[in-house]
Image (cartoon, helix red, strand yellow):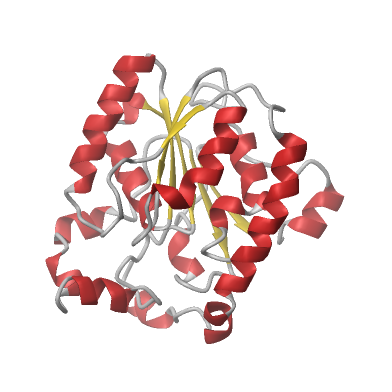
Amino acid sequence: MKTEEKDKIEKPSLFWLATEGARAAFEFGSFIPYKLLFSKQFDGQGFPVLIIPGFMSSDRSTKPLRKFLNKNGYRAQGWNLGRNYGDEEDIEFLLEEIDLLFSKNRKKISLIGWSLGGVYARQIAKMRPHLIRQVITLGSPFKGVTVSNHATWLHRFITAGKGEEIIDKEFLNDLPKPAPVPTTAIYSKQDGIVPWECCIENEENDIHQNIQVYGSHLGYGVNPLVIEIIMDRLQYGPENWIKFSPKSKLVQSLLYPA
């Protein structure tokens, strides 16, 4: 992303930031009846799914989503690295994990990454495209991880004020480039943490799609609208992938922004 483009992007409003917790709690409350109604409605056929948490989050944040996927026949697992502190070296561990998962299951792996976890997921798919079935990102600012957002201060704090200075420049420049596998970028214009403009692919094509939803940043993993998209997407692989489309125009008009 060019400097002039970055300068035009603003942090999410303080209103969306201040209401993140309450909105995420509402989404979690909505997820409870959803999972009761739709558990065991899908056949995951044992396909492995690796879910990577966001910055400063751990596998605990993705547990509800993993449990739901497992009940529907998938083999979903967390990243098993504790809290995500934004360490680039974690990608090397994840590459080893991908190799092991494929050796164990002999099936391509779907990657779901929440926020920074989605940035990692896209990079892994670029490095191991032959092992990846698809990538789904949830509010992941891959087009501008250094663009001003409401998590920047925390990263600077845990890096003793260095922030983006310690991030490899070549790595930063590669982040916006699309992965050569089917990729779905889910984003929300009500995201209170990162600018939604940084969470979408520059261009959509036969294997890359951006999907806008209503929701908070902290609630992506329990938002029924997001779960509905994830369950739809996980049915497809590189050989038969098609773009997501709501079941009806009424559903689209009521639940999904145009």
Q: Give residue 141's quadrant in the image.
A: bottom left
Look at 42% across and 81% down and name the residue there.
8
Q: Look at the image and tell me whether residue 153 can be seen.
A: yes
Q: How many marks?
A: 0
Q: Up-down: is 50 above or below 150?
A: above
| Position of residue 185 measured from the top left corner of the image (x, y, whole percent) | 51, 51
| Position of residue 186 measured from the top left corner of the image (x, y, whole percent) | 55, 53
Depth check, front residue: 165 or 150:
150
Depth check, front residue: 27 or 249:
27
Q: In which quadrant is the N terminus drawn? A: bottom left
Q: Is residue 240 left or right of residue 54?
A: right
Depth check, front residue: 84 or 253:
84
Look at 83% across and 44% down and name the residue there.
248
Q: In which quadrant is the C terminus drawn? A: bottom right
Seen from this angle, which residue lies furthest right? 250
| Position of residue 40 measured from the top left corner of the image (x, y, whole percent) | 69, 27
| Position of residue 108 measured from the top left corner of the image (x, y, whole percent) | 41, 22
Look at 73% across and 35% down and name the residue there.
38
Seen from this angle, which residue lies furthest bottom? 14
Q: Up-down: is 67 above or below 74?
A: below
Q: Is residue 170 left or right of residue 215?
A: left
Q: Look at the image and tell me whether residue 214 can be seen.
A: no
Depth check, front residue: 145 or 160:
160
Q: Is residue 162 left or right of residue 195?
A: left
